[in-house]
Amino acid sequence: MSLTNTPSANRLHIGLFGKRNSGKSSLLNAITHQELAVVSDTPGTTTDPVYKAMEVHGIGPCMFIDTAGFDDIGTLGELRISKTKEALQKTDIALMIFTDSDFSEEDDWMASLKEQGIPVIAIVGKTDQLDDAQQLASQIQERYQMKPIPVSTKTGEGIEQILPEIIRRIPENFESPSIIGHLVHPGDTVLLVMPQDIQAPKGRLILPQVQTIRDLLDHQCVVTCSTADRLDTALQSLNAPPQLIITDSQVFPLVSQKKPESSLLTSFSVLFARYKGDIDAFIQGAQAIDRLTEQSRVLIAEACTHAPLSEDIGRVKIPRLLRKRFGEALSIDMVSGVDFPKDLSGYDLVIHCGACMFNRKYVLSRVRQAKQQDVPITNYGITIAKLTGILDQVVY
């Protein structure tokens, strides 16, 4: 299998954290048996986090994140630390590397990891250079209630213990087990109404379509695909109504009107709201739409950073639906990629995309942030279903 076959968002994200010159990059190279990261004795060699996709025996597809030292200084240092904090939000398992007994920096980061429920593997690094590595290990165990792994990338000590420990710590909720398995049974016929607008790359399907089709085939379903303008023909070609119709959210109203009464209805975006995030929070957040007024303020967050095109769902279609309902003065802000405000308190609602480009840990960190600030958060597909009055018809 090619290392690039598995999307980054579906990989286990393993972050390496520690002070400058604690040996994070050397450790990454030793774990993976490859020269992935630049190694230097100069503190601060690693600046922005380095993301490296790997296929590791026993783990499968994963993403290692080599971060800048969290004790960096100066204006640039503060920017590097902010990038490290951003990487923390994407981390499923953290390797915390210790090389001295001054735990003032580590205390804050260990508290953040605990708060976010991220499993931590403590490592005493550079044991070949430490005067008393055993004493440091004892201090770490007493302070954080975890037994660290003594490691030396020079002698190889402890390296082989790390991967088994990572495997043991993989979170149970790392990924929802299936995109669609909760709604289908072997032999079910499923009709996919596929978006083929200008947002879709020429000659290709977009990622949610590909992953959903693969999941349906894994569940031994019979899959039929159609564009919205061929929906009637597709339905007529089937001997019986499909058990489930999965549609592009943008044509929810059309498909809802034409679907057979016995067929269940959902959308790619709604499915990914469950697969990538917290579906209950998104459904609850959609109720805030009823409380919006022309004086409200809405944030629309998109994972992709593509150049805006005409009739873009996040930048054009959803704002159009909202302003049609609540008035042209409704304030709507748009962010994309990793640009997500730390302070959400000024918003009455956050509407997030399906987040197929983010890992689940990162999406859940945004949901948690919204909850902590008491700001409702929902999803593109759920928003469209709510605004068009068919949310109660949608399965998720």
Image (cartoon, rainbow, N blue to C red):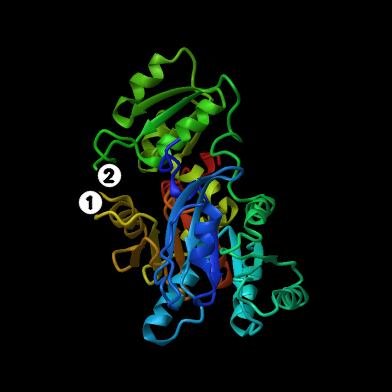
Residue nearest the observer in this picture, 198 or 19: 19
The residue depicted at 64 percent of the width and 53 percent of the height is: 160
The residue depicted at 78 percent of the width and 76 percent of the height is: 142
| Side of 255 relative to 376 (left or right) | left
What residue is shown with label 1? 309
Q: Residue furthest left?
A: 310
Q: Label 2 near label 1: C-beta < 8 Å?
A: yes
What residue is shown with label 2? 199
Who comes first in sequence, dot 1 or dot 2?
2
Q: Position of residue 138 (x, y in %)?
A: 76, 75
Q: Position of residue 23 (x, y in %)?
A: 53, 70
| Side of 321 relative to 6 (left or right) | left
* Quarter containing the C terminus: top right
Residue nearest the observer in this picture, 174 or 339: 174
Vertical placement of residue 50 versus 276, above or below = below
Residue nearest the observer in this picture, 297 or 352: 352
Q: Residue furthest bottom?
A: 74
The residue depicted at 45 percent of the width and 39 percent of the height is: 267
Amino acid identity at mark 1: Leu
| Side of 338 relative to 132 (left or right) | left
Vertical placement of residue 388 versus 150, above or below = above
The quadrant where residue 364 appears: bottom right
* Quarter containing the N terminus: top left
**Can see residue 288?**
no
Q: Position of residue 301 (x, y in %)?
A: 39, 60
Q: Residue furthest top?
A: 239
Amino acid identity at mark 2: Gln
Mark 1–mark 2 distance (CA, rounded to whole Å): 7 Å
